[in-house]
Amino acid sequence: MVSRTAIVLLMGLFGVLFLATQLPPPHGTALPDDPPITSPRIRLSDGRYLAYKEKGVPKNTSNYKIIIIHGFGSSKEMNFLAPQELIDELRIYFLLYDRAGYGESDPNPRRSVKSEALDIQELADKLLIGSKFYVIGVSMGSYSTWSCLKYIPNRLAGVAFVVPVVNYWWPSLPHNLIREDYRKRLVRCALLLANCAPGLLYWWVTQKWLPSTSVMKTNPVFFNSRDVDVLKTAKGFPMLTPDKLRQKGVFDTLRDDFAVAYSNWEFDPLDMSNPFSGNQSYVHIWQGYEDKVVPFQLQRYVSSKLPWIRYHEVPDGGHLIVHYNGLCEAILRALLLGEEEEPLEYRPIIPKFVSQVC
């Protein structure tokens, strides 16, 4: 039997993955249980609908088109903060969408690592954004990003991973690197419940005796001091509260997304070759040195195995670095212009003083 402590830690891990891509909506915003669909959607070839949101400059006048992939428990409403001046100067168009089952998109009963890339390709084609585009994947949105590198590399102009999760079951990960990692044990426990006893997992995480996920907000197991500063403006983990998880659709989406991310993939990313011609480096990983969800040692190993990836490590950065002031601008300048900046003072964002672009 899984202990109560393990379940609490699992909820905390899920919560951190959620917060890596999501800050709360403005104060006073209603969160109805079953809101009407208001976003534009495209119909996929299999009949499902994907909801999307366009930001930045109009795509027909843009120089750069970027698809942003949200992470666990998030949506197309995620925050990706960049100076409006930079967006106007570079003429950047952003396309955000709800991955299958999230937000206003239909679930995919045949979800797989490959299906994530195919959804993105079809979304791009339906919206006529062109033959090439950039992709930014945040936290658990990284498995969709790896899928793009594997299955639709010809469509990519460049890629940025932000605190990407690492699948402990990639064959090329050395055992001595992950043997003592307690996160691997938590993930294994979650997968066991999700795959073999989803009913038990559903019952367990919706029990009232479980502590509110707000207790995780200052838990040093998951957050460093800068993450805690970010969380001072956050309201907890709304997708992981018992009330939300009692909604079967929400629970099933979270369970299936987690299970696919940590499944046995059809490929090993560490065996991939550079998808870009001329051995150019157009792929980036951004990682916090103090990230307690995905340890920096794993990202350093990944980048050492794939020298065509440019690795950026943020000193004093945790898992929520995408919310640090200046980080999104640095990501865009490196991805689009090839600029290198020393990531020394990426301070947590205070939302009311920052132009919210995405």
Image: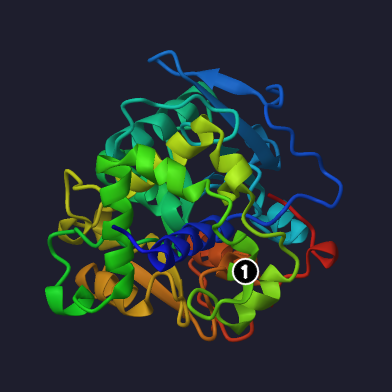
**For the point 18% across and 76% down, which residue is it?**
179
Determine whether, in the image, residue 83 is placed left or right of residue 71. Answer: right
**For the point 36% across and 64% down, which residue is it?**
3
x, y percent for residue 171: 13, 60
Name which residue type carries label 1.
Val
The kind of secondary structure element at disc 1 is helix
**For the point 66% across and 36% down, which residue is it?**
54
Q: Please name the residue that numbered disc 1 is placed on.
A: 215
Residue 63 appearing in the image? no
Q: Nearer the viewer, residue 35 or 352?
A: 35
- Quadrant where the N terminus lies? bottom left
Question: What colouring style does the render use?
Answer: rainbow
Q: Relative to residue 321, is residue 273 depicted above or below? A: above
x, y percent for residue 32: 74, 33
Q: How dense is the environment of label 1, judged by Cα within 10 Å: few (below 14), some, or many (20 and up)?
A: few
Q: Relative to residue 37, is residue 124 depicted above or below? A: below
**Count of labels in the image:** 1
Q: Nearer the viewer, residue 258 or 65?
A: 258
Determine whether, in the image, residue 279 is placed left or right of residue 349. Answer: left
x, y percent for residue 61: 67, 37
Q: Nearer the viewer, residue 59 or 252?
A: 252
**For the point 19% across and 59% down, which residue is it?**
170
